[in-house]
Image: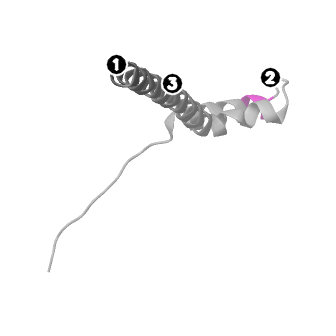
Amino acid sequence: MSNSTSSSSEGIGFFGLLTIALIVLKLTHYINVSWWWVLLPMYGGVLVTVLLLIIAGIFLYANHKKENNKRHDRMEKFRKNHYS
């Protein structure tokens, strides 16, 4: 018989807390904004992740193009030196 227990405490997080605060402010009429703006922080974590993936993709693409250009330049130099 095993006595192993595991617990995980992740908490509500920044975007969850911000969403709750905005909902409370909206329902108590302290702010007069659209519900779209009030609920937008719920998608904050997803938006940050997507933006980071896009930025990483741009850097990977730029690095790939740079490596291909270096490879092409080496091949041209090789051809010029050996086949001229």
**Residue situated in front as seen by the camera: 37 or 54:** 54
Mark 1 crowd level (few <14, some 14–19, many ≥20, 10 Å Cα): few
Q: What amino acid is at disc 3?
A: Ala
The disc placed on residue 62 is: 3
Say left or right for 32 vs 20. right
Say left or right for 29 vs 82. right
User: What secondary structure is marked by label 1?
Assistant: helix
Circle count: 3
Q: Are marks 3 and 2 in contact (CB under 8 Å)?
A: no
Q: CA distance from mark 3 to mark 2?
A: 44 Å
Q: Position of residue 17 (x, y in %)?
A: 57, 34
- Magenta residues, start to end: 24-28
Q: Position of residue 35 (x, y in %)?
A: 82, 35
- N-term-proximal mark, 3 vs 2: 2
User: What secondary structure is marked by label 2?
Assistant: loop
Quarter of the image with the N terminus in it:
bottom left
Does the stretch in magenta take in 68? no
Tell me what residue is drawn at x 54 percent, y 36 percent.
Answer: 49
For residue 28, which quarter of the picture? Answer: top right
Residue on which the image places disc 2: 31
Q: CA distance from mark 1 to mark 2?
A: 72 Å
Residue on which the image places disc 1: 81
Q: What amino acid is at disc 1?
A: Asn
Q: Nearer the viewer, mark 1 or mark 2?
A: 1
**Residue situated in front as seen by the camera: 55 or 48:** 55
Q: Position of residue 52 (x, y in %)?
A: 53, 31
Mark 2 crowd level (few <14, some 14–19, many ≥20, 10 Å Cα): few
Q: What amino acid is at disc 2?
A: Ile
- N-term-proximal mark, 3 vs 1: 3
Q: Nearer the viewer, mark 3 or mark 1?
A: 1
Mark 3 crowd level (few <14, some 14–19, many ≥20, 10 Å Cα): few
**Residue situated in front as seen by the camera: 41 or 70:** 70
